[in-house]
Structure formats: structure tokens, C-alpha cells
Image: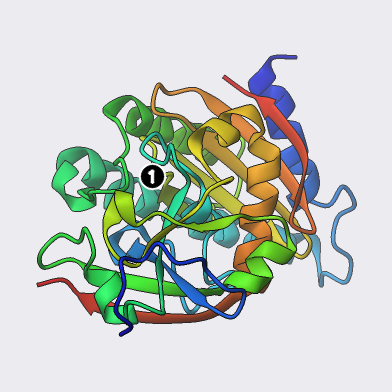
Amino acid sequence: MPAGDGHDPISDEEIVYRRVPEHYDYYDPNSEHPVAWIAFRPNQKDTGGLSVWRGKYLSAPEAAAKRAHSGKRYYVIALSVGRLREIGISVEPTSEDGGVGHASLTNMNYHSYQESKNAIRNWAEKITAELVEQVHGPFVAT
Amino acid sequence: MSTIEAGRSTYLHNFYPTEPATGAASDDSLVTAGQNEGEVVRKAWNTLIDSKLIEWGRDPSLLEDDELIPPSRAAIQRAVDLAIRLRDEEKLPAPKRVVPDGDGGVVFERWEGEISESFEISESGGIEYVLCRNGSVAERRIVL
């Protein structure tokens, strides 16, 4: 992994990881729609945007372990930064919020969701239907 | 028409064709098929209510997470009430996905082809109905 404080700009070529707990059923490999759009719905805690982790700094298992509960299992959804930006989603480094490698989908935040639920839902639908590069895991948190 | 009825009519419209299916062997076979189908549907709803919603309410630690907010008791109770109503009064198929919304609520979702429909139950127990076509919201309305 590269050295640095994680404040460096995120390039379009980077991959970011969105971590989802297995017990929330947001990923079902046997479903017609394997990734649930709800995995990309901001909640009250997402004031600065949805949390993701930069593949440049963390592996998928390392991203799964972030803020994880011991013994629980987590999937990691890999997304291309360039493709997210193509549909209008901002991806910015926010290591001050979660440490080196933390980033945020800044315009998918709780305030914007309250302002325009439909716009955020449309983005979430688009991400889950078309932009998922890969789903890793599940990984058991230790 | 109440708001919940307004939401229901669209849900019905999309998943139940107005014209009966053709090609059935006899009236009897239709009745039998309908009864069997009804039992299957009821069983699916019961599984959802007993194995998921009631379990969430009984043991909140099942959904503990640092980034996501588990469903509130009000949301779970409303989800159970809605499930019973859709099962018993509307006799609709069970949702294909029922998940916490990560913000204290619960979401029921069904899809068929290019259409998806969801009931979004908030932390406070409010319900919104959302219809999407081809991945875009076509309709959103407050049901309760």
C-alpha cells in the first residue's frame, strides 16, 4: 500500500469499496437484483456522504474490517470512481473522518436525500444495476 | 380513497393482470391452482413475518452495526401490520426483498421486468410507496 495521509486526490482509475453487513441482506448472489439499492441510501450518520474505502490504500478484506463488529460477516462492493463520476457522483478523500483510505460519495449525503429522495434513489438504482464491478466476501470480522 | 388504498391499487395493477390467464384446462383447475398458489403466498408471508420481522424485534442485536441504524420498534410493528394487511386483505404475493433501510426503517420490495415497487417504512412508522420504471422513480407517495 502506498505511503501517505490519504488526502491525495482520487483518480478516475481508482476503485472504491462500499462495505455492507451480510446480516442486512443487501447482497444476495442468487437474486435477479443481487445488490440492493438500499445499500446506497444515506442515513442520519451520512452527513458528509456515503462512506467508501479506497482500493489504493486498503484491500477488500481490510475495507470489510473497518468499523466492523467482531464475529459478523461483511461483503465489499467494488466500484469504479470514473464510472461513479460519469453519472454525477462526487468521490472525495475524507481521511479526516475515517483514517487513511476513507473517502465519501459527498453528494449522496443525508441532507441531499431528504431534499430529493428520488434523485438519490435513481443514483442508487443505477449503481446497483450497472456500476458494480465486483462483490468480495463475505469476510468475517475479528 | 384513502392513501393506503391509492398505493395498493398501483401495486395491484402492476402485478396482477386485469385479464385472466387463458389456456386453463377447466374452471376446476383454475380454482385448484388458485388455492395452491394462495397457500404458497401465505406461507411466504408467514416466513417473512415470523423468521425476519419478529426476530428483528425480539433480538435487536441481530442488526447491530456502527454505520447503519437498525429498525425501530415502531418500524418493525408497522412492517408486521403492513405484511398482515397485504397478506390477508389484499392477498398480494410476498415481497422479493425485505431489508432494514439502515436508517431505522424497513423496506419491502418487489420487481417484475422493468418495474419495481417498494413500501418504505420509516423509523417513525410512516409509509411511502415508490414505483420505479427502468431504474428511475416514476411515482412516490405517502401512504400513511
Is residue B59 depicted above or below A73 in this figure? above
Q: Residue at x 26, y 59 (%)?
A: A99
Q: Residue at x 75, y 14 (%)?
A: B1
Extreme residue toward the bottom, this view: A1
* Residue A41 x %, y %: 51, 47
Q: Quadrant of residue B5 in the image?
A: top right
Helix, strand or loop under label 1? loop
Q: Amino acid at mark 1?
A: Gly
* Residue A128 x %, y %: 60, 66
10 Å crowding of disc 1: few (<14), some (14-19), many (20+): many
Chain containing the residue with disc 1? B
Q: How many marks?
A: 1
Give the quarter of the figure containing the C terminus of chain A.
bottom left
The residue lying toward the viewer, choosing from B21 and A82, is A82
Whether residue A107 sits left or right of residue A6 in the image: it is right
Is residue B26 depicted above or below A109 in this figure? below
Q: Residue at x 48, y 32 (%)?
A: B121
* Residue B90 x %, y %: 62, 36
The residue lying toward the viewer, choosing from B88 and B47, is B47
What colour scheme has been applied to the protein in the rendered image? Answer: rainbow
Q: Quadrant of residue B123 in the image?
A: top left
Q: Residue at x 57, y 38 (%)?
A: B119
Give the quarter of the figure containing the N terminus of chain A.
bottom left
* Residue B53 x %, y %: 32, 44
Whether residue B103 sits left or right of residue A29 in the image: it is left
Would you name the residue on which mark 1 appears?
B102
The residue lying toward the viewer, choosing from A135 and B29, is A135
